[in-house]
Amino acid sequence: MPGRPTLEFLKTESSAGLAPLAAAAIAMALANSPLAGGYFAFLAQPVPVRLGGFAHTLSVESWVRDGLMAVFFLIVGLELKFEVLRGELSSPRRLATPLLAAVGGMAVPALIYLAFNLGPGGASAGWPIPTATDIAFALAVLAVAAPGAPPSLRLFLLTLAIADDFGAVAIIGVVFTHALRWASLAEAGAVLALLSALSRVKRAPLLLYAAGFLGVWGLCLDSGVSTAVAGVACALTVPVGARRPGGESMLTLFMDALHPWVAFGILPIFAFTAAGVRLQGLNLGPAAAPIGLGVAAALVIGKPVGVFGVTALAALTRVGRRPTGSTWPQVLGIATLAGIGFTMSFFMASLAFSGDAEGRAARLAVIGGSLISAAIGSVLLRLGRPTH
């Protein structure tokens, strides 16, 4: 079966990483300009959508988060399934180190955040915010800072980021699911079962998959389960075996078709709606200060400590190994780049906090922590290059 090469994916991600950053910069500029009123009014504008029994009225910002971002999580699920069955994650030896590093890179930031927020005035609900890595942004920084880095480092970062993104989806499903509507959830499960059966049909019409995905998404929105879970669940029903003319699998067809739209369309749109933080009047008082400090410290300190510490421990105990051809300073640089939360952290922040002050503090800390992580990681990667 002709698979989609992982290194080709890396090149696409690296080139796409700056698009959400540019959109976030535009959002920040608008939020702090004379046009701020129009920008925030646009984000809050209610948009009703009614189709048969489906009837929801959400703001523009909420439709982007709960609608468009479901396609992003569909891509995450497709990439995960492909890598586990055909790609880098199919080798247990290659999988061990980045998978363990991902666990450390989620646990340590969460603990650091909680250390700032378990006391009086803290907001413990924000602990998931620093747990995930922005794949596209991190790979873009790596491509600029260390163009000659060994491929093993890029694959290590990719595997690590995919693993903790999957962990983030699990957190979303468990932590941010409230007041379940079991009937809608059961109907979503039935549609998923039909999609699984459809995967056994050779050359099944693409429209049937699209209709199924849309149905699961709508039912999850009705049920109270995050639509991020719907995206990943749908992805796991797509067959990886050859099904299309020319030998291309349905899974790689969906990845190749959707990825440019997600990388250059959906993620920048989400960054534009999520990154607009009004600095005027921002008061990091008792309620917001622990949030901002906790998120920033978790990204800048917690991520490299968790990722690098577990990677070193895995190599020391021979459970895993250091990426081939890399130096330990380069591995530390990669671990620091894992502190670039950006898109995923924005998404978590939008779920964790509905209050204006808390949300603004969290998003501002995500921007600051991600930029600091990018800068420090770039320096470490440059200094860590082999001398011979």
Image (tube, rainbow, N blue to C red):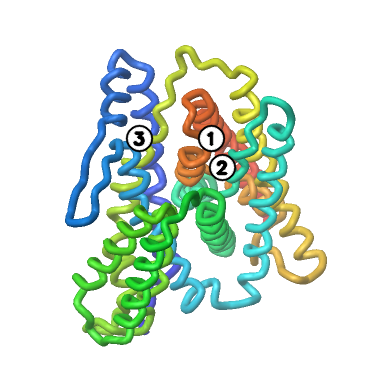
- Residue 375 percent coordinates (x, y): 57, 36
Cβ–Cβ under 8 Å for marks 3 and 2: no
Depth check, mark 2 against mark 1: the one in front is 2
Which mark, by number, is residue 129? 2
Q: Secondary structure at mark 2?
A: helix
Which mark, by number, is residue 366? 1
Q: Secondary structure at mark 1?
A: helix
Q: Secondary structure at mark 3?
A: helix
Report whether 51 appears left or right of 254. Answer: left
Q: In this view, which residue lies farthest toward the right?
A: 317
Identity of the amino acid at label 2? Ile
Q: Residue at x 29, y 60 (%)?
A: 258
Report whether 382 appears left or right of 12. Answer: right
Q: Residue at x 60, y 28 (%)?
A: 292
- Residue 254 percent coordinates (x, y): 30, 68
Q: Earlier in the sequence, mark 2 or mark 1?
A: 2
Depth check, mark 1 against mark 3: the one in front is 3
Report whether 229 appears left or right of 51. Answer: right
Q: Residue at x 51, y 28 (%)?
A: 364
Q: Residue at x 54, y 31 (%)?
A: 362
**Could one spot residue 188 in this view of the protein?**
yes
Cβ–Cβ under 8 Å for marks 2 and 1: yes
185 w.r.t. 237: above or below:
above
Spatial CA span between label 1 and label 3: 15 Å
Spatial CA span between label 3 and label 2: 17 Å
Identity of the amino acid at label 3? Thr
Residue 79, located in which quarter of the rendered image? bottom left
